[in-house]
Amino acid sequence: MSVKFKEEQRFTQWWLWLLLTGIAALPVYGIYKQLILGEKFGDKPMPDAGLIIFAVFVFALIGLFWNMQLKTEIDETGIRISFFPFVKKRIAWRDIKSVKVVNYGFVGGWGIRLGTPYGTVYNTRGNIGLAIELKNGKNLCIGTQKAQEINTLKGLADGSYLTK
């Protein structure tokens, strides 16, 4: 079994990391002001323990975004998707009714989007994805930055994988 297509994507938008860095600065400044300088942080200061818990939460959220990764692999056995740490799926060709690259438009953000016209959408950026219609009636779409490469895959472009 050889992989015909492989793509790994992360959240790399500069504005997202600027926003997350700005959010992270708030508890860092609060801890510095309240715990180091001994001055209360804000009009209604949070207890020290609450400030620390808030900081841990913010940095855990940033760590989650840092480690999130959308992986797609296509080979002669099927399509594998992993959106670490949330989803890991393997879809055999025998379970797929159709597959095509589509422009799914804006689906309300990035990550995992439910209830779209293409079913569940998994994406990190952009609006192009591999739409998969399953024989059981469910749909899903995997965002891609390599639409041209997917469109040229032997077996996918000619539909021969779907007839196995």
Image (tube, rainbow, N blue to C red):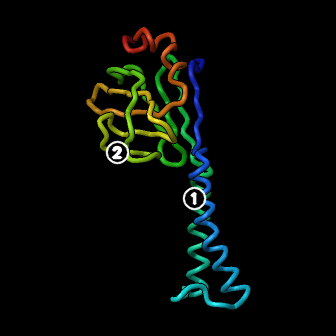
Horizontal side of 86 relative to 102 (left or right) equals right
Res. 56 image quadrant = bottom right
Residue that label 1 marks: 19
Expressed as whole percent of the image width and height from the top left, the position of residue 69 reads 57, 42
Horizontal side of 31 relative to 77 (left or right) equals right
Q: In this view, does 17 lie above or below 153?
A: below
Expressed as whole percent of the image width and height from the top left, the position of residue 37 reads 73, 88
Tell me the distance, in whole angstroms, between the alpha carbons under discs 1 and 2: 24 Å
**Quadrant (top left/top right/bottom left/bottom right) for the C terminus:** top left
**Quadrant (top left/top right/bottom left/bottom right) for the N terminus:** top right
Which label lies toward us, 1 or 2? 1
Residue under the point 48% across and 16% down: 151
How crowded is the residue under tag 1: few (<14 C-alpha within 10 Å), some, or many (20+)?
few
SS at mark 2? strand
**Residue type at the position of mark 1:** Leu
Res. 7 image quadrant = top right
Expressed as whole percent of the image width and height from the top left, the position of residue 163 reads 37, 11
SS at mark 1? helix
**Residue type at the position of mark 2:** Leu
- Residue toward you, 153 or 23: 23
- Sequence-wise, the earlier of marks 1 and 2 is 1
Residue under the point 38% across and 35% down: 105
Residue under the point 53% across and 48% down: 85
Residue that label 2 marks: 114
Farthest residue toward the right? 36
Farthest residue toward the left? 137
- Residue toward you, 7 or 163: 7
